[in-house]
Amino acid sequence: MEHTPVSISYSGSPERESRRYAGIKLIIDGKVTEVLGPDGGHSLDRGRDYGWIILEGPLAPEIEGRLEPMILEFKAPPPKPPPVQGGGSEYLAETRDLGGGLSLLVVWQGEYGERILRWLISNAPPDWDVADLIITTDLPEIIDDPAPFLPEDLPQVDLLVFLSESRNAPQLAPDLVRGSNAVAIIAPVDRTDWMPPGQVTQLKRIFSRWKVDTSFPRPFCALECTGAEAIDRFASVFGRPEVEILTEDGKTVSEMRVIRGSPCGCTRYVAENIVGERLEDAVERAGLLHHHFPCLASMEREDDLDDTLMHVSGLLLKREVEREVKRHLDRKISYLDPRQFKR
């Protein structure tokens, strides 16, 4: 067995050992009859119960054989995200007048990004200028020189929309911002593996130094205005769903107007397919349509949320529909309140 940090978790653990060691770390459940410590002796008493055991060196075959049956689950710790270098020369975002429109560069890598790009191009206001750039997902763990992966000349834009689909791609974000002369970046986190928290922190530090406005919505359809002009101009059209539900008979949805829709097009899809639904059932119907679209956010459970980003996305839409439905139902209940007929 190699001298590598590993973590072995087990069911029914009374406690968890979170520290990391340079040597082999074993967490087991059960009695250990004999374990050799780093000095080669019996460092742990015979017949006791241990929640965790640390061995600083490789396991002898006979010891490994005794421990193996006790291990219920083995999982190596995830690798740390590669550092974001920010490479090359420094950059300082210029103060500029955006005028009435917005120029943006959408950087994408695969099917997820392409689908968002198509929706943005077909639904952006007519005075927006939308350019795009595809970069490979076959990137090295550490990108010392970004030149082989980026074109020499990038479109000059106000806003960079960075749609990462690989854990190493965020390293290119600073060079893309600098090369495109952008004053702001939106880098959604629809899958944590593609935009790890450590890299988000590094990017925020770099862009703060460069006076570049940033937004890392998690998921993309959680995007709201931040007070930064370029980001707000984008977020006024695409981001956290905002709708208006109309009803002609007070019972069913006659129309659902999209004031601000999700960047993938899901909000518009729901709006087109919820017409005719009973107001009482509209919230659940919206959630079902969101699932059928389907949502592009991750189905992996996030530890800090204790939920999936796909579920978070669906809740954002359902709460907005619920707000509108409640507006109509409250009005209806108020009108039918029998107390108003009391003499």
Image (cartoon, grey):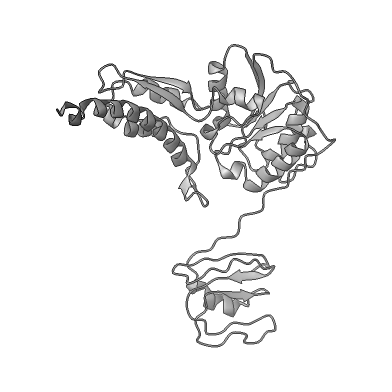
Residue 99 rendering spot, x and y as whole percentages: 68, 14
Q: Quadrant of residue 23?
A: bottom right
Name the quadrant of the C terminus.
top left
Q: Residue at x 63, y 40 (%)?
A: 166
Camera-side residue of 189 and 82? 189
Above/below status of 31 relative to 138: below
Residue 322 rendering spot, x and y as whole percentages: 36, 32
Residue closest to the far front:
343
Above/below status of 201 relative to 54: above
Q: Residue at x 53, y 75 (%)?
A: 67
Camera-side residue of 55 and 295? 295
Counting the numbered discs, the total is 0
Is 250 left or right of 89, judged from the image as shown? Answer: left
Q: Residue at x 69, y 29 (%)?
A: 184
Residue 288 rendering spot, x and y as whole percentages: 35, 33
Residue 31 rendering spot, x and y as whole percentages: 49, 81
Residue closest to the far right:
89
Is 103 left or right of 311, judged from the image as shown? Answer: right
Can you see residue 139? Answer: no
Can you see residue 310? Answer: yes
